[in-house]
Image: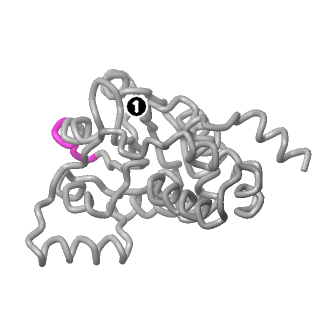
């Protein structure tokens, strides 16, 4: 069985390089190239072997993911597009389907889940979870407008949230963070909940991944620390 030919486009260099390094080790995949903006993606597509799937971020410089998707669907109609973005919201799903994307995923998705979805999209053309389909049904039945994502940086963290996120990455408990920062445990819990909401993370592991991908902690330093532990 031939490998799935993949292209990755994302303007976050650390995330792009990290994802490429991880996916290159998957026998079922062949990474043709990566791009850190929309113009680079479109330019390379003209001279490269055509991929089966493009992993595409929503928020990029020069051209955002919605503009790129519209262009790809017009000039490369057989190309499958998986949106992989920190701006993931189920409320955007209707608009994403209207654009013609083949899957819409959050950036903090687990690797094994991402691989499973890539293979499903390659074989069946589409992948949407029951939760996403239920959300879409609610949007349609309520007559809710399928609005495009607002790609401003809505998830900007406050200084205190960054401080607490750093301590979470250093494996401090809520009680230890409260003691260290001279605040109450309830306040720490409130900040942690805000972090989960803003980042779209589901748990502490998701928060750590968010911090690493957005360079809020030192990637190499953490890898060395974890390997020593």
> Considering depth in this image, is 156 or 113 the residue closer to the camera?
156
The residue closer to the viewer here, 155 or 151, is 155
Q: Residue at x 43, y 28 (%)?
A: 35
Local secondary structure at mark 1: loop
In the image, taking residue 179 as reference, residue 47 lies left or right, namely left
User: Is 36 located above or below residue 176 in the figure?
Assistant: above
The image position of residue 74, as x and y in percent, is 16, 39
Q: Nearer the viewer, residue 119 or 37?
A: 37
Indicate whether residue 7 is drawn in magenta: no
- Which residue corresponds to mark 1? 49
Q: Is residue 140 left or right of residue 35?
A: left
Please, which colouring scheme is shown? one colour
Q: Position of residue 216 (x, y in %)?
A: 61, 37
Q: How many marks?
A: 1
Determine which quarter of the picture holds residue 214.
top right
Q: Is residue 92 above or below residue 156?
A: below
Q: Which residues are magenta?
A: 73-78
Instruction: Identify the residue at horizontal 36%, vertical 75% (top origin).
Output: 131
Instruction: Write down the quadrant of residue 24 in the picture.
Output: top right
């Amino acid at each position: 069985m031939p490998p799935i030919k993949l292209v990755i486009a994302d303007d976050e260099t650390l995330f792009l390089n990290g994802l490429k390094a991880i996916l290159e080790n998957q026998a079922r995949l062949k990474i043709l190239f990566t791009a850190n903006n929309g113009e680079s993606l479109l330019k390379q597509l003209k001279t490269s072997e055509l991929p089966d799937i493009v992993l595409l971020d929503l928020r990029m410089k020069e051209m955002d993911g919605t503009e790129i998707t519209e262009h790809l669907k017009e000039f490369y109609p057989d190309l499958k597009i998986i949106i992989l973005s920190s701006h993931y919201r189920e409320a955007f799903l209707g608009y994403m389907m209207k654009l013609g994307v083949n899957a819409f995923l959050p950036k903090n998705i687990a690797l094994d889940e991402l691989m499973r979805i890539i293979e499903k999209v390659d074989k069946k053309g589409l992948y949407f979870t029951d939760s996403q389909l239920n959300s879409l049904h609610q949007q349609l039945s309520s007559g809710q407008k399928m609005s495009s994502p607002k790609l401003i940086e809505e998830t900007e963290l406050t200084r205190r949230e960054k401080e607490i996120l750093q301590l979470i990455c250093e494996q401090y408990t809520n009680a230890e963070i409260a003691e260290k920062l001279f605040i109450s445990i309830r306040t720490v819990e409130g900040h942690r909940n805000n972090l989960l909401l803003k980042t779209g993370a589901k748990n502490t592991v998701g928060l750590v991944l968010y911090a690493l991908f957005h360079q809020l902690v030192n990637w190499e330093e953490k890898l060395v620390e974890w390997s020593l532990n």
